[in-house]
Amino acid sequence: MLSGIKVVEICGIGPGPFCAMHLADLGADVIAVERPQGQSAPDGQLLNRGKRSIVADLKTPEGRDIVLRLIEGADVLIEGMRPGIMERLGLGPDACMARNPRLVFGRMTGWGQTGPLAQAAGHDNNYISLSGALYYAGRAAEPPSSPFTVIGDVGGGALYLAVGILSGVLNARRTGKGTVVDAAIVDGSAHMLQLILSASRKGFIGGERGGNIHDSSHFYSTYRCADGGYITVGSIEPQFYALLLEHLDLAGDPRYSAQWDRQQWLALHGHLTGIFASKNRAEWCALLESTDVCVAPVLSPEEAARHPHNVARGIFFEGDGQLQASPAPRFHGRTRTPGPIPRRGQHTEEIENALNTPGHDQLWRN
């Protein structure tokens, strides 16, 4: 779907490479500019799939010249350095857009290009804790915890950068002018709170931790099974809640008659904890998984790759000796086949030769 979009990525770690991989998964031609051996991530990075790899030392005039020549015909540049570093290298937005006024200059940081924390180090959990996105994670009696990198680096970071970049490309095609995209994880993860802020008006969530459906109720929770596995229950709507009680032989139990009586939630959660601990995860799945009770097993990525639903949709595959997730979303019901993972610098000679040809006609693939 993104055939014809040309991307230069200044390789870093985390959300920037994920964004560039996502664009490559969707058909963009991505050239990853990697640091010399020993200065960056190990070879064969999964997030480099579908890209071409060239090695360049940006601390040298030669390395910087390669980047400037690459962006002359590119639509997008992606970088994830601390604010000001690209400028000090002579590769900031002004320098790059002087070479290519239509360039979309995508910047990926945790705190953003401006603000008191702009120069501070940080990681996924720091950004989402400051934005408010971590606050409601987990049950009330436990410290907030979130899936590593998922909410911040990917959700609030890489995917927001991708949306910003594509918006900039559309604008450049309409106006002929490039855009600087300031994608900050603290911004994106805060924006994702809109659904929670909306839910708070309905009484589902809000205020202090505890007393909300996700951290205190018995009908929206995660339960440990007899074999040590876990199952999630999300029977929020009354018809789904009724089915949950029916399948657990609790339909006539008066304790469960008032679903939204928060005073009863703790006791009912304890009761269901004992019930779900009486069977193995597979037994609960056989009983509930194909119903409207709204349940699912908590699977590791390796287990998820073997689940019949995920197998039927081809959500995971083995490629380059590694378990990988297939590109998403799908178009016309089909998922794209991603490109291979390149070795570091695998395409250096090919790309440098193309840069030395008149008009760089052989540089871009589509």
Image (tube, grey):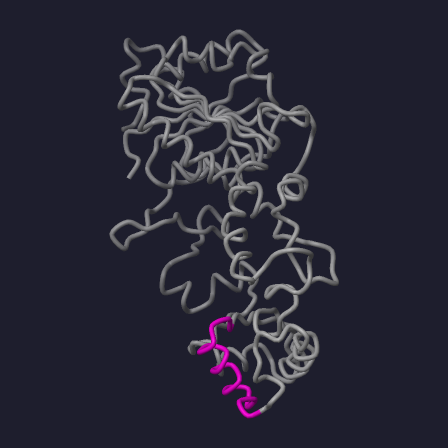
Tell which of 276 and 138 is nearer to you.
138
In this view, 311 is above or below 330:
below
Give the x, y percent position of residue 283.
54, 82
State the quadrant of the C terminus. top left
Tell which of 175 and 208 is nearer to you.
208
Is residue 122 shown to the viewer in this render? yes
User: For residue 81, which quarter of the picture?
Assistant: top right
Give the x, y percent position of residue 152.
58, 43
Is residue 226 shown to the viewer in this render? no
The question of residue 224 being in magenta is answered with: no
In this view, 149 is above or below 60:
below
Identity of the residue drawn at 69% across and 27% down: 120
Identity of the residue drawn at 41% across and 13% down: 97
**Farthest-out residue, left:** 332
In this view, 262 is above or below 171:
below
Identity of the residue drawn at 52% across and 18% down: 56
Q: Is residue 271 left or right of residue 1?
A: right
The question of residue 240 being in magenta is answered with: yes
User: For residue 143, which quarter of the picture?
Assistant: bottom right
Number of labels in the image equals 0
State the quadrant of the N terminus. top left
Tell which of 279 and 242 is nearer to you.
242
Give the x, y percent position of residue 238.
47, 76
Identity of the residue drawn at 44% across and 49% down: 319
**Magenta stretch in the rendered image:** 235-252
Give the x, y percent position of residue 209.
69, 58
